[in-house]
Amino acid sequence: MFDLPKYGAGICLARLSELLEAFEIDRIWLSRISVVVTGSNGKGSTAAFCGAIARARGLRTGLFTSPHLFRFNERIQINGEPIGDDDWRRHHDEVMAAIEPISRRRGEGFGSFEAMFALACLHFKEQACDFAVFEAGIGGRFDPVRLVGSSITAVTSVNLEHVELLGNSLPAICSDKSDACAAPGTIIYGENCRPLRAHILEYNRSREIGSLFVRDEIGIANESASPSAQRFDLTFGGETLRGLETSLIGSFQFNNAAIAATLFLLWQQQNAQDTAEENEAALRTGLRGARWPGRLETIAQDPLTIIDVGHTPDGIRQSLASLKAIHGEQGWVLVTGVSFNKNVAEIVNALAPSFDQIVCTSAHHKGADASEIAQAARNAHAAAMVHVARDVADAVRIGREIARASNRKIYVAGGLFLAIEFAAVVEGRALEELNFY
């Protein structure tokens, strides 16, 4: 499946619809059980929160997300457990066999993300899911998740990203992502979408789409954070739930948790299944129990080592601000690396000025040259001590030596592959065994 190109030929909706028909996926059932999460940053955490809430309510819950961190199986989960190898192989063979005649007849090639989406739908059908959360890949208008047909969706945040596909302005990108929602329906917009409120309301007005905004129609108050948990009050629909707790840290997680909770409450209203007391219990248990690795995740204590997989400048700045607020501004060693297809200077500029000890390296997967990253770090912070590591394992060694010699903590940030490979080395895994695309 990963030998397929990342994107298929042109717009995928028609050929993917044929593929779902080949598997006799009931599209009415799929739309009824599902919510969709789109956005620039925060999609994965929001999807994880929402899935955890549904599981806490006792619903058999499917979760489709991307990218994976360590194994492909992570992308498709049932009740928090990745799809098993046997089911993965069986469904893989079914999907690939069904793709071949459709591609030949239409003269169009499928992309790998399309194939994985179909595999998830097939697995959720076989597992008789009561509830499913689908995370979009890039946009919404032509993203496979549009075929879910969900009338309850979210746009977690909007930044300038994938402009060649989505448009070169925030209103254009937000419009594209909003198109994942089926009409009549409701879209929940994250806090950073509020400056686009006037555009969004007009864009959705004639489409029979309602628009709800975090910190407007969805209230957040009394936020507090510690290294182990966060607490906040949530107000929606005239009701306030006080002291909700999450184990995922970072100021951006208040936004994600609020969106996830509202997604589930709207879905419950549509399906009229539970009382307010049952919903509140599920929200409290699910938000507290949700796990989503890689986002300000502590992977070691001696020295304290925190990784973050954020790889957009805005996401990196948000995570850095939360790191400082929760763990303190001083006494850090930064280990950084950037993928070769990203803007190295922009990402390093968001990180380097906050650290006086910086270790630069190149990830095994798609890593930009370490010397290029080091030069960007020196340009961004001339007074910093900049070290160049030959690979991620060497970066682990150098970072630990500096941290232990001067009683410091380690922060690993700048790219998804860097953060995951650093964690893999710490756990004793071989980087060559990690498969990405």
Image: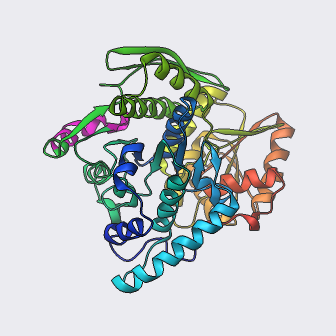
Asked whether residue 60 is in view, the answer is yes
Q: Where is residue 330 in the image (x, y as percent from the top left)?
A: 68, 31
The residue sitting at 26% across, 51% down in the picture is 175
The quarter in which the N terminus is drawn is bottom right
Q: What stretch is highlighted in magenta?
A: 188-202
User: Which sits in the foreground, 126 or 427?
Assistant: 126
Nearer to the camera, 48 or 297: 48
Q: Which of 123 and 145 is in front in this view?
A: 123
Relative to 258, does residue 202 appear above or below in the rendering? below
What secondary structure prevails in the magenta region? Answer: helix
Q: How is the image coloured?
A: rainbow
Instruction: Please tell me which residue lies in front, 96 or 320.
Output: 96
Which residue is rendered at x = 67% and y = 52% of the image?
419
Q: Does the magenta stretch include residue 196?
A: yes
Q: Quadrant of residue 231?
A: top right
Whether residue 263 is situated above or below residue 120 in the rendered picture: above
Q: In which quarter of the image is the C terminus?
A: bottom right
Q: Is residue 112 above or below residue 418?
A: below
